[in-house]
Image (cartoon, rainbow, N blue to C red):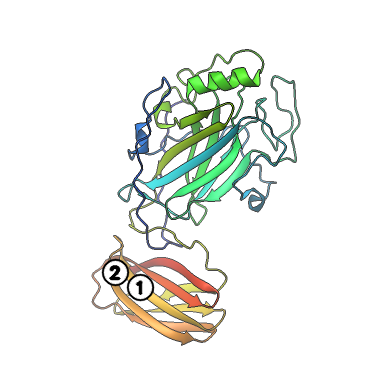
Amino acid sequence: MNRKDFLKGIGLVGVGISIPTIGLAKVKDLMDEPSNNDLLACTAIPGETAGPYPAPGSVSTSTLVRSAITEGTQTGIPLTLTFTVINIDNGCLAVSGLRVDIWHCNKRGYYSAYDGQPGIDGTVNNGGTTWLRGIQYTDSNGQVTFTTIYPGWYTPRATHLHVQIYDSSNNLLATSQLAFPDATNTTVNAYYNTSGTNSFTNTNDSVFSDSYANELMTVTGNTTSGYIAVKQIAVSAGTLGIEDIEIETGGQFGKLINYPNPCNEKTTLSFNLIQTSDIEITILDVTGKLIEKITKKNLDSGKNEIQINTSKLQSGNYLYQLQVSNHSGTFRQTKKLIKN
């Protein structure tokens, strides 16, 4: 399979101020594999097929938002996965609020949610199940963690797992697959005692053969205590210099718009508050630099409108962020402002 480019802009709705990533220590690759130096690099994850068994449309996304994904039904060697998502368009900073979906086969090489799967145990029906599938949202360090089991394998593939990354507006940013070190796969496959030896390694796998150095996870551990796999995943998430902190408004406000947009001398922000709240409006340029801040105390619930003077702005794209604070917490949303 040829290496594919899945780079896509994140868009401008639903973003907040960025938090720089914590410095990552270089992890020595103890396996006889190419060094996983992309833990420190900033190269976009290669795009790959979602495979034959992505989550079917009949599966509710909300049921998969979880970090532990075995559902207590899938046994095997424990595996902890930690992924850090960074933005290649913004100085390789960590991105918070992105949705990370993963799925992989069980130790016998079968996936949940699908009937009629061929494999070492014959044709197996797993329709209606959701094990070994999970969704998490990146934290302020750009990280998600899943607890699962080390996958098995099936012909004609090396051991792998699938990953998709979405922005806060559910736009797909990347679809890829992640590889495990061949030496670890050999050890695990012998431990699982599956049918024979897998002849497919990362170097002759149809997906990984042209790009697996950038899809290889760094794995430590053993069959007794379990394994830990870490991977930094770089995606194209736009050049705004700001990312999500709160990807939801907490139900505290809605219908945030500004009009006219594009604007000339002034624009009006309109929004609905659920309860009496303090608000803060910030205007930023596309690098995240603060241009203006407006605060209002004790705005009543219902529709509110605030006029903003834009006459001093140069023509171009800007951002405005509404921050709402009340006894329920603090909530933010950011949208695009265009000055003619």
Would you identify the image quadrant in which residue 218 lies?
Answer: top left
Kindly identify the amino acid type of the residue bearing the numbered disc 1.
Answer: Thr
Tally of numbered tags: 2
Instruction: Write down the residue under mark 1.
Output: 282
Q: Position of residue 293 (x, y in %)?
A: 33, 76
Q: Please say if the residues under marks 2 and 1 sit with CB atoms less than 8 Å apart.
A: yes
Would you identify the image quadrant in which residue 257 lies?
Answer: bottom left
Q: Which mark is residue 66?
A: none
Instruction: Write down the residue under mark 2.
Output: 290
Asked whether residue 70 appears in the rendered view, the answer is: yes
SS category of the residue bearing label 1 = strand
Please state, as top left, top right, bottom left or bottom right, where the C terminus lies in the image. Answer: bottom left
Q: Vertical placement of 284 versus 273: above or below?
A: above
Kindly identify the amino acid type of the residue bearing the numbered disc 2.
Answer: Leu
**320 or 102, nearer to the observer:** 102
Q: Residue at x 74, y 32 (%)?
A: 115
**158 to the left or right of 258:** right
Q: Vertical placement of 143 versus 215: above or below?
A: below
Crowd band around label 1 with a 10 angstrom C-alpha radius: few (<14), some (14–19), many (20+): some
Crowd band around label 2 with a 10 angstrom C-alpha radius: few (<14), some (14–19), many (20+): few
Q: Residue at x 48, y 72 (%)?
A: 330
Q: Vertical placement of 92 versus 261: above or below?
A: above
Q: Position of residue 253 (x, y in %)?
A: 53, 74
Q: Position of residue 207 (x, y in %)?
A: 49, 26
SS category of the residue bearing label 2 = strand
